[in-house]
């Protein structure tokens, strides 16, 4: 059967399998690199919101401590708590502005929006904290839950092959 083929067709049969194999391997490598680029874009997003989320967590922790002191204590609303709330509001604004660099619909963006909404819901309870209408465990739990949501919004481990670890 091969004896009936011309030399051109014989060469084509010899080269064709290697050409197809090369095409398949190139496609697989391209898909790997595409995934790697997507992972790096998500890492870039995480880094961009890490600073503002860290500042927000820190301010919420301060406000939580001062709110607990106010709810468990007596007297008027301390000026230090009012100042801490202003700093928390500024940190929340910064966190919101950092979300503009996120890709719409990405996992990081969705978690950041969800965390921000939960923080806003918590901050809406400030008047109840001022008048001591919320029990201390609920106040503490609310702040702790909001802090946990922010941390979860940025906590993600990127699984990279060992040869592609970024130092």
Image (tube, helix red, strand yellow):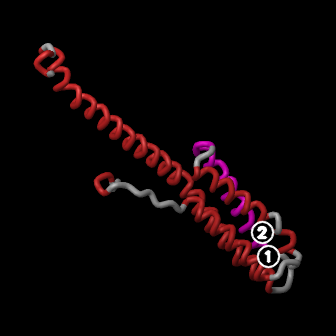
Q: Which residue lies furthest to the front in this view?
A: 1
Specify whether residue 91 is painted magenta.
Answer: yes
Residue occupying the point 73% across, 62% down: 118
Q: Position of residue 5 (x, y in %)?
A: 15, 16
Rendered view: 5 above or below 150: above
Which residue lies under the disc numbered 1? 78
- Which of 47/106 is in front? 106
On the image, the x and y values in percent for residue 132 come to 86, 79
- Residue contact between numbered discs 2 and 1, judged by CB atoms under 8 Å: yes
Q: What stretch is highlighted in magenta?
A: 79-104
Q: Which residue is drawn at 71% across and 68% down?
A: 84
**Element on which disc 1 rests:** loop
Q: How crowded is mark 1: few (under 14 residues within 10 Å), some or many (20 or more)?
A: some
Asked if residue 89 is among those painted magenta in the image, a careful observer would answer yes
- Indicate the position of residue 6 as horizontal and vertical percent values: 14, 13
Q: Which mark is residue 82?
A: 2
Q: How many marks?
A: 2
Identified at 45% across, 48% down, the residue is 39
């Amino acid at each position: 059967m091969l004896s009936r083929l011309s030399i051109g067709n014989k060469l084509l049969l010899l080269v064709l399998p290697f050409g197809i194999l090369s095409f398949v391997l190139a496609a697989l490598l391209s898909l790997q690199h595409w995934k790697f680029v997507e992972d790096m874009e998500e890492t870039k997003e995480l880094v961009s919101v890490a600073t503002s989320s860290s500042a927000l967590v820190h301010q919420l922790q301060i406000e939580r401590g001062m709110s607990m002191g106010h709810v468990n204590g007596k007297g008027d609303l301390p000026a230090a708590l009012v100042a801490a709330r202003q700093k928390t509001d500024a940190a929340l604004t910064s966190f919101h502005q950092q979300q503009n660099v996120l890709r719409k619909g990405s996992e990081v963006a969705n978690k950041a929006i969800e965390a921000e909404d939960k923080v806003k819901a918590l901050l809406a309870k400030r008047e109840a904290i001022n008048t001591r209408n919320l029990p201390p465990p609920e106040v503490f739990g609310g702040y702790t839950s909001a802090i946990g949501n922010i941390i979860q919004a940025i906590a993600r481990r990127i699984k990279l092959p060992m040869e592609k670890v970024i130092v």
